[in-house]
Amino acid sequence: MSRFFSSRYTALTPYTPGEQPQGRKYIKLNTNESPFPPSPGVLKAVTEEAQRLQLYSDPESRLLREALATHYALRPEQLLVGNGSDELLNFAFMAFCDENCPAFFPDITYGFYPVYASLNRLPYQEIPLREDLSFCLEDLPDKKGTVFLANPNAPTGLAKTAEEIEQLLQKRRDCVLVVDEAYVDFGAESVLPLIDRYDNLLVIQTFSKSRSMAGARLGFAAGCEALIGDLNTLKYSTNPYNVNRMTAAAGIAALREDAYYQANARTIMENRSYTASALCDLGFFVPESKANFLFARSSRIDGGRLYRKLKERGILVRHFEKPRISDYVRITIGTLDQMKALLHEIKAILKEEEAWNG
Ligand code: PMP
């Protein structure tokens, strides 16, 4: 730390992204990316748009918001696009929390939530998940506060139904509920259709997972016009050109080729079932995931050791050195071949452990 660093941030613990190795080639199952490349129309759109890079992008991202509005049966005024959904989540913390309105989120969830709260010096309360890692809506404090809910949750993969979320919206009419649907396309229910009925609902989605665009950085927030207006105030106070030309063009093209991405999501869900049942056969405990990853623990090897042994064998998964979940690894679902390679190595590692333990 330099002696010039603002005292506002000296206590900040930044978010730790998953490893992005540049040297050795790994089977990469650690950051919930898609194993499938973008569709041909996306590649073409990016190439064409690159020829206009001397010009700023449209600060309103009008064409992209229109395409999203058509796709999701919304109005463009109900949408804001961002540099990944991370940027929009940060805006939501800034916009809808303050000293009198803390943030509420589960104790085990997306690791960026406490970072955004701390960065913006906002009070927050972590709500403990139950023993089976489920989140019970009744556990939320009966007081004012903005709720941030990843649905499906990360890293557990467990999802709430749209009906449960609607009950929460009704119960907390005077508080904003931010539903982070980064993984919703892998089998969970979206609450986007509720936006017209609830002025306290903000839904955030990303093109990083089901639409194979993690490297392009594109997310969107959907909510009533007033909520989106608040987020826009922050966007225009931070970075009006937050979505670059190539990414905006790629987003429009991806929506046009939706069938390709839906087929890929189906394949991921099939590979997820295959992997989950194979892991259960090996004695793992695997909560039912509606996301493009599995969260798994074995009584035969602890999470950190399994992570390290897999890495030695060329497979990267994610391990969190955090109370209550350090026994687990989070495994991104890849192609069937990748999943078979993973299971092959896990079997070999478990055999080694047995021999070692006598
Ligand atoms: N929400 C959740 C729950 C996530 O796991 C992630 C990805 N790490 C994000 C949001 C952010 O995704 P992106 O910024 O790539 O859109």
Image (tube, helix red, strand yellow):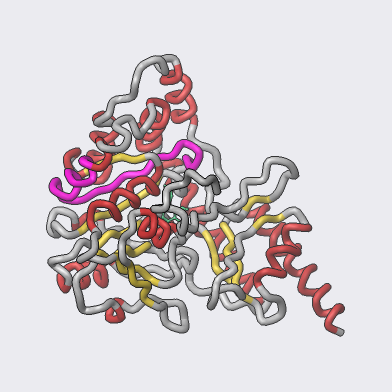
Q: Is residue 343 above or below residue 315?
A: below
Q: 180 left or right of 40?
A: left
- The percent coordinates of residue 340 (x first, y second) are 69, 59
**Quarter of the image holding residue 117?**
bottom left
Could you tell me residue 200's position as x and y percent?
Answer: 17, 59
Q: Residue, x 23% and y 39% (percent of image)?
A: 70
The image quadrant that residue 30 belongs to is: bottom right
- Direction from residue 65 to residue 151 in the image, left or right: right
Position of residue 180 in the picture relative to residue 32 (left or right): left
Residue 208 is a magenta residue: no
Image coords of residue 347 (percent x, y): 75, 69
Q: How many marks?
A: 0
Region of the chain picked out in magenta, as a range: 212-233
Please tell me which residue lies in front, 333 or 168: 168
Vertical side of 230 occupied by 109: above or below: below
Magenta region includes residue 225: yes
Nearer to us in this view, 32 or 174: 174
Residue at 36% across / 44% down in the picture?
219
Q: Quadrant of residue 257?
A: top left
